[in-house]
Amino acid sequence: MPEDYIVLVTEDTDPSSAPVEGQRGWGEEVRKRISCLKEVRLPVSQLEQNMNQFLHLIGRLFKQVDQQIGSESDMRLDEVELSVEISGEGEVKLVAGGKAAGKGAITLKFTRSNAAK
């Protein structure tokens, strides 16, 4: 069975592929930004593996937070919202701060189920 792929559009980080600075006008800026974009075919299985590992670690982290809060007070963690970004290599990264969140981050929102309340 052939491997499924997802196509990501990412910035080319190779400095030799970037256009030379010093050009004028907004048209040149647009061409410069577009020329830095590239498509990457990423195997879905690799992305699944990386996302599963990321979610496992996040789950462990917030389970500890929930246990710590519950042992010291009547409060509990009901909702967690995270922004993640997928790199051209398939890495799943937690986005910290508002500046990076505008770059196409995925928002994951976890809400406690009614059964756990």
Image (tube, helix red, strand yellow):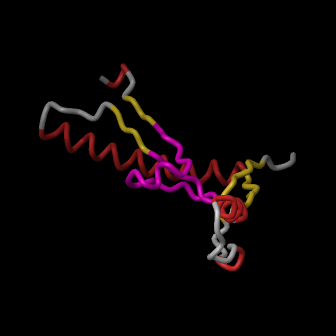
Name the residue: 62% across, 76% down: 22
Seen in the image, is 6 located left or right of residue 21?
right
The spot of residue 91 in percent (x, y) is 58, 59
Name the residue: 21% across, 44% down: 68
Name the residue: 79% across, 46% down: 4
Find the residue positioned furthest to the top. Answer: 114
Q: Indicate yes or no whether the magenta region holds residue 115.
A: no
The spot of residue 108 in percent (x, y) is 48, 39
The spot of residue 46 in percent (x, y) is 67, 54
The spot of residue 93 in percent (x, y) is 50, 56
Residue 71 picture quarter: top left
- Magenta extent: 83-108
Depth check, front residue: 80 or 76: 80
Name the residue: 64% across, 63% down: 25
Find the residue positioned furthest to the bottom. Answer: 16
Answer whether residue 98 is visible to the viewer in this image.
yes
Check the image and report above or below for 67 versus 113: below
Check the image and report above or below for 112 versus 14: above
Seen in the image, is 42 located left or right of residue 3?
left
Q: Indicate yes or no whether the magenta region holds residue 100.
A: yes
Check the image and report above or below for 57 versus 67: below
